Amino acid sequence: MLHVIDENLLFMAKGEYETVHANAMALIRSNVSDPAPYLLLAKLCFDYENYVKARELFEKSVSLAPDNIRVLTYFSQALTQLGEHDEARLFADRAASLEPSSAHIADTLGVVYSRLGFHEKAVLCFQQAVSLDVKPANYHYNLAASLQFLGDFEAAKTAYEQSLSRDPEFYRALVSLVSLEKQSAEKNRIDALLISYQRWKRDSDAALYIGHALAKTYEDLGDYTTSFEWLKKAKSGKCATANAFSYERVFSAAQEPAVSNCTTNKAFDTPSDKQSSSPIFIVGLPRTGTTLVDRILSSHRDVISGGELNTFAELVKRATNSKSNLVLDAQTLSQANTLNLHNVGEQYVEATSALRGNAIRFTDKMPLNFFYAKLILKALPNARIIVLRRGAMDSCLSNYRQLLTTQHSYYDYTYSLKTTAQFYRKFDQLIGHWRASLPNNRFMEVQYEDIVFNQQATTEKLLKFCDLEWDDACLRFHENKAPVSTASSVQVRKPLYSSSIGRWKRYGDLLHELKDSLGDLAEDV
């Protein structure tokens, strides 16, 4: 069975789908009770986005081989991609209990656990993958990334170096090494990065990663002009190839009123028994303090961090059944106004139960959930929303200089200063709309600068807003051992520092386009 699956997965990787389909049908004719062909057909359907049929075939395969580690692993992988996180974890746990003897399966399980936010389990799987096959560079890279999320930076550095030693052209490992520590004149990786850039400069994604690492290096060295030049060079290829994403339509759709005969107009009522938990949504632009607030709150004895979850957005998408191929878009947000959002709320509580555990509160810090603020409060009457604000110039610069995901078009606005400023203006207008229309006992704005300069007073306000008693541990958030799977994984393990406030001033006239585009929102000094 293993040989048949592996052989056909190789065909699938080469795009030879007809061959795989023919082979699977031949296997079924030979033995209708063989789980292998149903697994292969399930993966084919998944690749073709026929998710209903894919699930049916995965379930058929599992029913025929309930203790087959490959069947369980690939099903958990598909469930993760479909946003069925609770079920994905259950199948991943079943697979992991069978102790993988295949490095590929162990690595795949590690990726599943990592995407689900269970980084301790991910590390164990990645360590197993490396022990079973020490050669592949990506196994060491995956291990390093989860170690970094867990705050074990020395072990992460070693694993990234192991990855790079096996594949010197693996630019992601090189870039990650630069992110782990501040670069200095005596100790930096400029030469290696320049060589890597020359090798990969025609690949827009690779150029983006490497260029950002060079920009970070030169900023660490205090050379802001060269740093800024590398940012522009890194983003130039992505500017030319980025998919158009209609931000303006999404911002407008978020503010549309609910349909008059829709149950969501009963708005902010009391929760049902199934919605008795109290999620705290931490939203805002990336790099404006969302992870910091998450660490502060999850340091409390009664709070656990759920990480950055796309769960609410995926549930809304599924409930609307909108035909677009994006989870977040104007059509989906508009159709959401016709939903019975209580059902979505109950599904959200159920889907996050494993991450929440026995905690009284838990946090969900997906930044772009600010688009869903009204929907969240109607779906989850016990929820709280905390939106992070930061000075406009620092907010835009932090978005522009940070490498965000390249897998989705939602962050394409960061490829130029002008579009970053335009996005900020729309964001500022939307938050103003929420401020005027949402109940202030459930929607709160927090200024990043207030946290830095008035840590205790701001923390007290945060806890009071979330109906939490005082806990001194919240002031020692940097001691929090929970995983951090964001770009702030290094910074939030340090005490508060103010050096990032007013960072934009160091770039001087280089940011004139940003300042002009922000207009009246830009700070003067």
Image: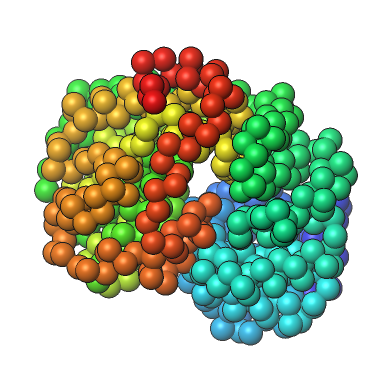
Vertical placement of 479 versus 347: above or below?
below
Q: Is residue 188 left or right of residue 243?
A: right
Residue 63, image x and y in percent? Answer: 58, 72
Point 18% across, 43% down: residue: 442
Expressed as whole percent of the image width and height from the top left, the position of residue 196 reads: 83, 48
Q: Residue at x 58, y 48 (%)?
A: 51
Question: Which is nearer the eye, 264 or 298?
Answer: 298
Q: Give the residue at x 85% y 60%.
A: 168
Q: Nearer the viewer, residue 490 or 138?
A: 490
364 lies left or right of 450? right
Q: Where is residue 110 in the image (x, y as percent from the top left)?
A: 61, 69
Residue 502 at least partly seen: yes
- Determine the image quadrant of residue 250: top left
Q: Going by the image, does 301 lie left or right of 184? A: left
Q: Which of 2 and 425 is in front in this view?
A: 425
User: In this image, 80 relative to 469: left or right?
Assistant: right
- Reply above or below: 265 against 467: above
